[in-house]
Image (cartoon, grey):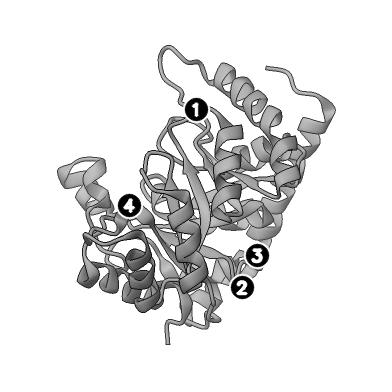
C-alpha cells in the first residue's frame, strides 16, 4: 500500500518521538527504580453499566459521587433516558465524559449522543482484521469512516478517540500514531487502554510514543501468568494492582507526556456499592497518589 508524502512524514514524526523516548529511557528507568514518581491527579471514572445496584439513574450518580468518582461513560447499548442523565449530572456534579460506540458504525449518531449527554468524546473501535477482512483494506476503510465524521465532530466539540483493542489491528504504538496523524484533525486521538497492551507489550512504551495523541485512558489489569496457565482472556481476571502492569512506570510515562489531570476510567467487572468502593480505592493506589 502506497502512502502520500504527508503520511510518510507522520510516520517519521512518530518514529522520531520514539527515538527521543529511547534516548531518555535510562533517566526514566532510574526515576521509576527509585520510586521517584511524581503523583498524578487524574479524574476518576467507571463505565455506567458497571453499576449493579438496583437504583434510579439519579441514585446511581449519587452513588458514584459518594465513592469518589467524578464521571462515567455510557455505552451505545445501555438503555437510559438522556433527560434523566442530564438531570442527574446537574444535581450531583458527576459528569458523563464519554460515549462508548464500540458496536455501531454510525459515528454521527454517536457524536449527537455524546453532545446530548454533555460528553467530550466518542470511543471508536476501528474495525477488525481477520481472514475475510485484509489489513490494508481495513486500514483504508476505517480512515475513510473517521474522515467522513471528523468535520462534524469538530463542529460539535467532540473528539473521536480510537481504542487499542484485540481486533488484530493497529498492533504497535508507532502504527497507531501514524494512523491518527494521517487523519489530520484535532478531533482525532487515541483512547488508550492500559490493560489491553500487557499481553504483548508494555503500556509505558505505548504512552510515550502516542504522547499528546492520548485523549483518555481505560484502566484494567492483565496477568501473563493466568494467560499462560488458563488462556488469553483469563489474563484479565485479576484485580487492579495485582497483575503485570507496572503502575509506577505507567505513572511516570503519563507524567512525562503531560497527561496529569485527564480522565482515567475503570473497565473491569462491576458490582454493588462495596465492589465499586474497592475499585475506587484501587484506582487511587495505582494512579493518583502512591504515597
Q: Please, what secondary structure does the residue beneath circle 1 have?
A: loop
Question: CA gap, disc 4 to disc 3?
Answer: 31 Å
Left or right, residue 241 beside residue 202: left
Q: Which quadrant of the view contains residue 6? A: top right
Query: Which residue is rendered at x = 35% and y = 59% of the image?
Result: 57
Please state the horizontal and vertical placement of residue 30, each as a whole percent of the image.
54, 76
In the depicted structure, whether residue 249 falls above or below residue 219:
below
Discs 1/3, front: 1
Q: Which residue is mark 3?
A: 257
**Residue at mark 4 to residue at mark 2: CA–CA distance:** 41 Å
Which class describes the residues within 10 Å of circle 1: few (<14), some (14-19), or many (20+)? many
Image coordinates for residue 3, horizontal then vertical, percent: 75, 23
Say which label, 1 or 3, has the lower sequence index.
Answer: 1
Disc sitting over residue 49 in the figure: 4
Where is residue 235 shown, x and y percent of the image? 25, 49
Badge 4: few (under 14), some or many (20 or more) residues near its Cα, within 10 Å? some
Residue identified by numbered label 2 = 27
Q: Residue at x 69, y 27 (%)?
A: 148
The label shown at residue 127 is: 1
Assign the C terminus to one quadrant of the image: bottom left
Q: Nearer the viewer, mark 2 or mark 3?
A: 3
Does label 2 or label 3 sit earlier along the sequence?
2
Q: Nearer the viewer, residue 222 or 200?
A: 222
Amino acid at each position: 500500500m502506497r502512502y502520500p508524502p504527508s503520511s510518510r512524514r507522520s510516520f517519521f514524526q512518530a518514529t522520531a518521538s520514539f527515538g527521543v523516548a529511547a534516548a531518555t529511557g535510562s533517566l526514566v528507568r532510574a526515576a521509576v527504580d527509585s520510586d521517584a514518581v511524581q503523583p498524578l491527579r487524574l479524574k476518576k471514572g467507571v463505565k455506567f453499566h458497571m453499576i449493579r445496584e438496583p437504583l434510579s439513574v439519579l441514585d446511581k450518580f449519587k452513588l458514584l459521587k459518594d465513592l469518589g468518582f467524578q464521571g462515567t461513560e455510557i455505552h451505545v447499548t445501555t438503555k437510559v433516558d438522556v433527560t434523566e442523565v442530564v438531570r442527574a449530572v446537574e444535581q450531583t456534579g458527576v459528569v458523563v465524559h464519554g460515549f462508548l460506540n464500540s458496536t455501531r458504525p454510525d459515528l454521527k449518531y454517536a457524536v449527537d449522543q455524546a453532545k446530548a449527554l454533555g460528553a467530550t468524546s466518542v470511543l471508536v473501535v476501528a474495525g477488525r482484521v481477520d481472514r475475510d477482512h485484509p489489513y490494508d483494506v481495513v486500514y483504508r476503510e476505517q480512515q475513510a469512516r473517521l474522515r467522513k465524521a471528523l468535520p462534524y465532530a469538530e463542529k460539535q466539540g467532540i473528539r473521536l478517540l480510537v481504542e487499542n483493542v484485540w481486533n488484530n489491528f493497529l498492533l504497535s504504538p508507532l502504527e497507531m500514531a501514524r494512523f491518527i496523524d494521517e487523519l489530520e484533525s484535532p478531533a482525532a486521538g487515541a483512547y488508550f487502554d492500559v490493560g489491553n497492551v500487557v499481553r504483548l507489550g508494555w503500556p509505558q512504551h505505548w504512552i510515550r510514543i502516542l504522547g499528546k495523541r492520548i485523549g483518555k485512558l481505560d484502566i484494567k489489569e492483565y496477568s501473563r501468568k493466568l494467560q499462560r496457565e488458563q488462556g488469553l482472556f483469563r489474563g484479565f481476571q485479576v484485580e487492579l494492582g495485582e497483575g503485570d502492569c507496572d503502575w509506577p512506570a505507567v505513572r511516570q510515562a503519563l507524567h512525562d507526556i503531560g497527561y496529569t489531570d485527564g480522565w482515567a476510567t475503570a473497565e473491569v467487572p462491576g458490582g454493588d456499592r462495596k465492589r465499586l468502593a474497592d475499585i475506587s480505592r484501587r484506582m487511587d493506589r495505582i494512579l493518583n497518589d502512591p504515597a
